[in-house]
Amino acid sequence: MAVSSLQVNIAGVKLNNPLILASGTAGFGEEISRFYPLENVGAIACKGTTLEPRDGNPPPRIAETPSGIINSVGLENPGADRFINDYLPWLNMQKAVVIANIAGSTQEDYCALAEKFNDTAVDMVEMNISCPNVKSGGLAFGTSCQSVAQITRTVRSHCSKPLIVKLSPNVADIAEIAIAAESEGADALTLINTITAMKIDIQTRRPILRNNIGGLSGPAIFPIAVRMVWQTAAKVKIPVIGAGGISSWQDAVEIMLAGAAAFQIGTANFTDIYTPREVLKGLDEYLEANRLKSVNEIVGGVRAW
Ligand SMILES: Cc1cc2nc3c(=O)[nH]c(=O)nc-3n(C[C@H](O)[C@H](O)[C@H](O)COP(=O)(O)O)c2cc1C
């Protein structure tokens, strides 16, 4: 009999468990719901949504590496209106906690998107200022304290939903970027997004990706995510949502010990669609084996030297 609770609270939103499907790896939930009910996961962060529909970058858009993938999808999505009108009502029927992930080329784009979601049944907004795969905007907003502070302040004033700021690992000091977002009103932080990377075909001498470079995700980046979560959680009071290469329950425990109040699973969904089920089962068993009543008891529990 399960006696431990997996429930967490992120910025006032109650999640049945700390597992969130990472943006861009679960679409809008439809395909995944053919394998398990979406209400089994804590929340779904939907595909990055822009004001207008986008086709994304030309293929090839995925390059495989020994322990991860490099993607340059470039924010292919149906646009905010279609998300709100076609996908959101269905997601609500599934009783999923829904996180809208927003991206834009200008601050005005982000503000307009945040406003669009104000009067919808979206539970939280995750602002992606860390996408390495678009020409303008994206990562450009996420790499200096000044620009992070400014966009967070501006979007905050247009957003009535809990606002999660998703940070880029492509920076020198993640903690100072996190502090900048927190001080301007972020309710939570997600870290990390992908790490800029490249792969070259040695025969053709061409990069595998048509975009030349992309973002590395998967197990290769997990230790970097753990380090960044640990450095950040020690410096901010708002919840940190860990992401980056989590593919087992042991990874989930590890990133929570580093300070993550919840965590996202992305690339591991591609390797095995049932990863979330296995992670939640293992997490539950770990809590019981350690006689812990709540998953919150392990958050930040690392005994650093
Ligand atoms: C194919 C693909 C598409 C992604 N699209 C988005 C996106 O639209 N918005 C976003 O914030 N992050 C996006 N990401 C980043 C993931 O949400 C996540 O932060 C990153 O992949 C690290 O986690 P993982 O190693 O578990 O995949 C994408 C990742 C992949 C692999």
Image (cartoon, helix red, strand yellow):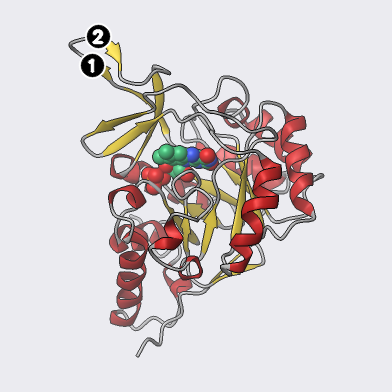
Image disc number at residue 205: 2
Quadrant housing residue 34? bottom left
Q: Residue furthest left?
A: 203
Q: Nearer the viewer, residue 33 or 2?
A: 33
Pointer 2 with pointer 1, Cβ within 8 A: yes
In 3D space, how far apart are the residues under numbered discs 2 and 1 (Cα atoms)?
A: 5 Å
Q: Is residue 47 left or right of residue 61?
A: right
Relative height, residue 198 to residue 53 (above, below)? above
Q: Is residue 189 left or right of residue 249?
A: right
Q: Which residue occupies 74% across, 30% down?
A: 107
Q: How far from the left and from the top, in percent, is residue 39?
A: 51, 69
* Amino acid at dot 2: Arg
Residue 192 visible in the snapshot: no
Q: How far from the left and from the top, in percent, is residue 16?
A: 52, 73
- Give the labeled residue for mark 1: 201
State the quadrant of the C terminus. Answer: bottom left
Q: Is residue 54 left or right of residue 19?
A: right
Quadrant housing residue 140? top right
Quadrant housing residue 295? bottom left
State the quadrant of the N terminus. Answer: bottom left
